[in-house]
Amino acid sequence: MTTTATSVLERSHVTISGAKGPNTQTIVFLHGLGGDQSDWRLVVPHFEKDYQVVLLDLIGAGKSDQKAYEPNAKHSTLAGHADDLLQVLSALALHDVVFVGHSVACMIGVIAAVREPERFAKMVLVSPSPRFINEKGYAGGFEQKDINELLAAMEGDYTGWAHGFAPVMMGQKESPELVMELTNSFVRTNPEIAKHFARVTFFSDTRAELGFLTIPTLIVQSAHDIIAPLAVGHYINEQLADSRMKVVETSGHCPHLSAPQETLSAVDHFLHQETRLR
């Protein structure tokens, strides 16, 4: 591995576990807004027997190199984060991976897969949304004023916002420990980076990318999700060339945390079923 490749992996705090071997497929997990790679701890052990597991932090999150975050350049769009993902895959010389993304990371993965499809074999999109704002003929879940108010609340009192937004995002009144975990994750994140990335996330529009994705894809959707409503999941499923959708009977935006066994069952079924050739 070259020095350049090593620096890429260190920058994104890449960790590798699981099976090894020349014919072992790799599964790559990427977290969403306010989280880090530890978000996948309830599902990763399930895959370590059969897959090489690669975890990474979005630049600016977790234990990534925060100095590498470029708010006015590379990371002013989701495409910059897709570049980071592709650089990690290139540094590890990976092709035909299974990509698993959550929330905004789903669309980062979609952008990356459209750019370099040979690096991806299958996609798992957990609670994805290509556009959060409602428009004529499209129901994203939020009005423009809702997003403006959300971002204003972050600017005014970031910690207070985190305590208020985490229960909405997790949606698990019966699991206060998950709500507190997410709250703490938000609070640990550099507030300036979090506020900037939230703006990039909630104003993004990646609907045009969907028509170019031909890789077999599973959409995992919570039955009750305010952040990415069922209508959004159905929209993505209709736009993709080769996709299927699984609704998990849970609330909130994080079924891999609130309903890990049901999420694993859906992913397992998808990974072991025959899919159309690209």
Image: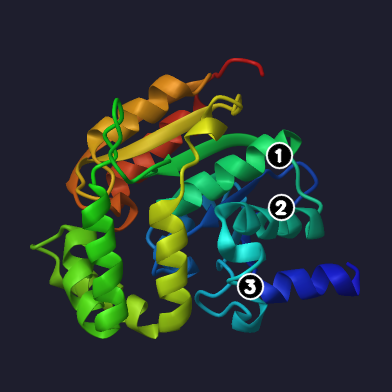
Side of 105 relative to 188 (left or right): right
Q: Earlier in the sequence, mark 1 or mark 3?
A: 3
Q: Are marks 2 and 1 in contact (CB under 8 Å)?
A: yes
Q: Nearer the viewer, mark 1 or mark 3?
A: 3
Q: CA distance from mark 3 to mark 2?
A: 17 Å
Position in image of residue 162 (x %, y %): 25, 76
Quadrant where the C terminus sits is top right
| Res. 131 in view | yes
Q: Is residue 212 above or below residue 221?
A: above
What amino acid is at disc 3? Glu
Q: Residue at x 25, y 31 (%)?
A: 231
What amino acid is at disc 1? Arg
Residue holding disc 1: 115
Disc marking residue 70: 3
| Res. 181 in view | no
Position in image of residue 6 (x %, y %): 81, 73
Q: Is residue 164 above or below residue 106?
A: below
Residue holding disc 2: 86
Q: Earlier in the sequence, mark 3 or mark 2?
A: 3
Q: Which image quadrant is residue 220 in?
A: top left
Q: Are marks 3 and 2 in contact (CB under 8 Å)?
A: no
Frontmost residue, 21 versus 210: 210
Mark 2: secondary structure: helix
What amino acid is at disc 2? Leu
Task: Count neighbours of disc 1 (C-alpha within 10 A) and say few if under 14, some if 14 to 19, many if 20 or more.
Answer: some
